[in-house]
Image (tube, helix red, strand yellow):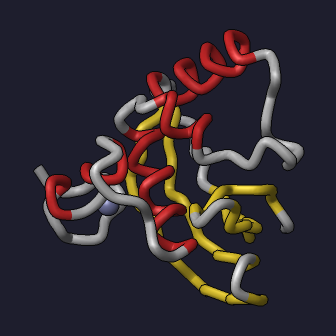
Amino acid sequence: MLCPCKSHATYDQCCKPFHDHKSTPQTPEQLMRSRYSAYALSKIDYIIETTDKGGPQYDPDLSAWKSSIAHFSQTTAFQNLTILENAPIDETTATVTFHATLRSIRGEDLSYTEKSLFKKKKGRWLYHSRVI
Ligand SMILES: [Zn+2]
């Protein structure tokens, strides 16, 4: 199976080792891609563990957050991902701008462009917040 992050690599050779905790994304873009494919494959715990606890996206109500991620994952078709820009700020901060092509199961276009902020903590890149 091709990786849902649209890297053109197979899932086994792309995001699966990250989802299986066999390796850790070395760049913010790898983390971003692995989170996109985690949404596509309903790897809910992966989304939570790669979200910065100090950021606004982290919801301490884990059961509500898990059901909201599960609902989103299961009612959305993850059609494409395009990385538009990688912008390292310093060794532990970077932004990645991407366009996600998404469609709801009802057929609504949910596509959007986001500039995401990533922070490296304890050697691991984490998603912090949406900048734009
Ligand atoms: Zn991938």
Q: Is residue 8 left or right of residue 86?
A: left
Q: Is residue 107 visible?
A: no
In the displayed orientation, state which residue is furthest to the front.
122
Whether 32 is drawn above or below 93: the answer is above
Front residue (pair 69, 120)? 120
Residue 56 image position (x, y, % from top left): 88, 44
Q: Name the residue rendered at 86%, 47% in the picture.
A: 54
Residue 92 image position (x, y, % from top left): 72, 77
Q: Is residue 32 left or right of residue 41?
A: right
Residue 19 image position (x, y, % from top left): 35, 44
Whether 103 is drawn above or below 69: the answer is below
Front residue (pair 41, 108)? 41
Q: Is residue 57 visible?
A: yes
Q: Is residue 74 left or right of residue 5?
A: right
Q: Place residue 91 in its image quadrant.
A: bottom right
Q: Name the residue rendered at 47%, 51% in the picture.
A: 36
Q: Which corner quadrant holds the C terminus?
A: bottom right
Q: Name the residue rendered at 72%, 12% in the picture.
A: 64
Total numbered badges shown on the rendered structure: 0
Quadrant where ligand 1 appears: bottom left
Whether 70 is drawn above or below 27: the answer is above
Q: Is residue 51 left or right of residue 78?
A: right
Whether 77 is drawn above or below 64: the answer is below
Q: Name the residue rendered at 69%, 89% in the picture.
A: 88
Residue 44 image position (x, y, % from top left): 50, 28
